Amino acid sequence: MSNTVMSADDVRRAITRIAHEILERQHGPAQIAVVGLQRGGAWLADAIVGALHVIEPESRVPLGYLDVSMHRDDIGLRPVVPGAISRIEFPVDGATVVLVDDVLFTGRTVRAAMEGINTYGRPRAIQLAVLVDRGHRELPIRPDYVGKNLPTRLSEDVRATSEGVVVSRGVES
């Protein structure tokens, strides 16, 4: 059984709101860089940068992608399967890097992303934007920008795309 909790229009509005919040907190687009976490955060990072450009047409916010596979803390516990290629073709030194992921769950992917981004330099700050925060954190990580807080059960699966957010109900163990 699955339930749509955000429609495509809801997702679009959340992305626009997140883009506005980023610009407000940073007082404009200068020194902002956006990095989407492969795979789920890549499409969302593209959309956020697109929304930033609509709001500030003259802005050229750098956009990159980061595969965190080799930075995870569960290497050895499960097979390492690289998600995609990392591509960060701009200096992160001194920038405010906004990491972007579709769904925040335990926080372990974000921890790996922070380690991964540091291999590219030393950002002034790292912030986190997510479309869905579902709770169940295992690490002390909190997003700076959230499209929707969505309390879930551990057994549920949350899928977020530009077409909407769907929660599939699993069997509680």
Image (cartoon, rainbow, N blue to C red):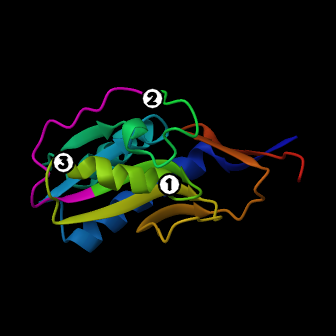
User: Which residue is painted at 22% across and 69% down in the image?
Assistant: 26
Estimate the spatial distance between the alpha carbons at disc 1 and disc 2, rounded to whole Å: 15 Å
Under mark 1, the amino acid is: Arg
C-alpha distance separating marks 2 and 3: 24 Å
In the rendered image, residue 151 lying in the magenta stretch gets the answer no
Label 2, secondary structure: give it.
loop
> Disc 3 versus disc 1: distance between alpha carbons?
26 Å
Regarding residue 16, the answer to whether it shows in the image is no
Under mark 3, the amino acid is: Val
Q: Secondary structure at mark 1?
A: helix
Q: Which residues are magenta?
A: 83-97
Q: Relative to 158, is 137 above or below?
A: below
Q: Which one is nearer the viewer's eye here, 88 or 7?
A: 88
Residue that appears at 36% across and 43% down: 36
Would residue 9 be visible to someone looking at this image?
yes
Front of the two marks 2 and 3: 2
Q: Residues within 10 Å of mark 3 (few under 14, many from 20)?
A: some
Q: Earlier in the sequence, mark 3 or mark 1?
A: 3
33 relative position to 40: left or right: left
Question: Residue beneath label 3, please?
Answer: 61
Residue 59 spot, x, y in % from top left: 15, 50
What kind of residue is marked 2?
Answer: Gly
Q: Which residue carries the number 2 mark?
A: 83
Residues at circles 3 and 1 in contact by the CB criterion of under 8 Å: no
Q: Earlier in the sequence, mark 2 or mark 3?
A: 3
x and y percent of residue 146 in the render?
A: 49, 63
Left or right of 136? Residue 39 is left
Q: Position of residue 81 (x, y in %)?
A: 49, 27
Pointer 1: what residue? 108
The quadrant the N terminus occupies is top right
